[in-house]
Amino acid sequence: MSDEADQGFLIVFEGTDGTGKSTQLQLLYDALRRKGYPVIATREPTDGQYGQKIRQLYKNREKYSSEEELELFLADRKEHVETLLVPALNRGEIILCDRYFLSTAAYQGAIGFDPETVLARNSFAPEPDLALLFQLPVDIGLSRIISGRGETPDDFEQDENLQKVAAIFTTIDRPYIRKIDASESIESVHQSVMEHVAALFSDSPYPALD
């Protein structure tokens, strides 16, 4: 989305549940804030009208058909794009987004949709400048959810479903995707994130990230 000098960057954090992407987003947000960058953090599903309906699916995914579920994700993203993402990019801000349309392609692909078709239906959404794909064996991710967070996996976080999601993530090929080994320590993963972001900033109006 940074075709022009006065536009910001969209950096998205993707991966199966339990990979630590939300933790890494917060660490990057804090690092950029300390250095004075104009950064905002957001997430999908959002807290908007459609995002709230999606969050209800965490407890009961049978409430809607597969197509209705996909339509909810698309409606939530359209609202997100119009109300937050595009205005912030046009102000020259750096957006850190926890999940975006790559997750929709992977998670909806796991229930039968063609991932590339799902991506095509997201053509209204700005492409990320950088998509950080956190990769971790599904069983380790589930262990982090259960023992680390003390949570019970929701309807999207079941092992069989996440195995399919992880496999689909590996098949999506876009030039802005950078894969990160999420099995390393939090600090090591953070350093990998910072290196990819520094490379993104190297040829931009933003000051170098050192």
Image (cartoon, grey):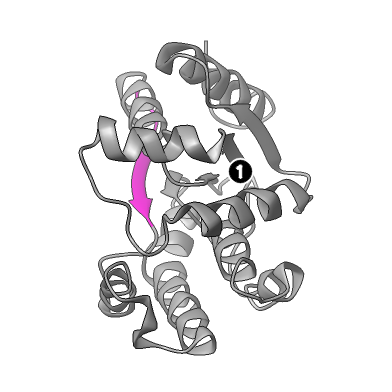
Residue 52, given in percent of the width and then of the height, sits at 25, 73
**Label 1: element kind:** strand
Can I make out residue 38 in this image?
Answer: no
Residue 43 falls in which quadrant of the image? Answer: bottom left
Start-end of magenta stretch: 36-43
Residue 113, given in percent of the width and then of the height, sits at 67, 76
Residue 87 falls in which quadrant of the image? Answer: bottom left
- Mark 1 crowd level (few <14, some 14–19, many ≥20, 10 Å Cα): many
Residue of label 1:
131
Residue at x-position 50% and y-position 12%: 188
Residue 94, given in percent of the width and then of the height, sits at 46, 42
Residue 121 falls in which quadrant of the image? Answer: bottom right
Height in image: 4 above or below 80? above
Residue 32, given in percent of the width and then of the height, sits at 39, 26
Q: Is residue 150 magenta?
A: no
Residue type of the residue flagged with mark 1: Ala
User: 89 or 28: which is nearer to us?
Assistant: 28
Height in image: 3 above or below 155? above
Residue at x-position 66% and y-position 74%: 118
Q: Is residue 41 magenta?
A: yes
Task: Decide whether the magenta segment is chiefly helix, strand or loop.
Answer: strand
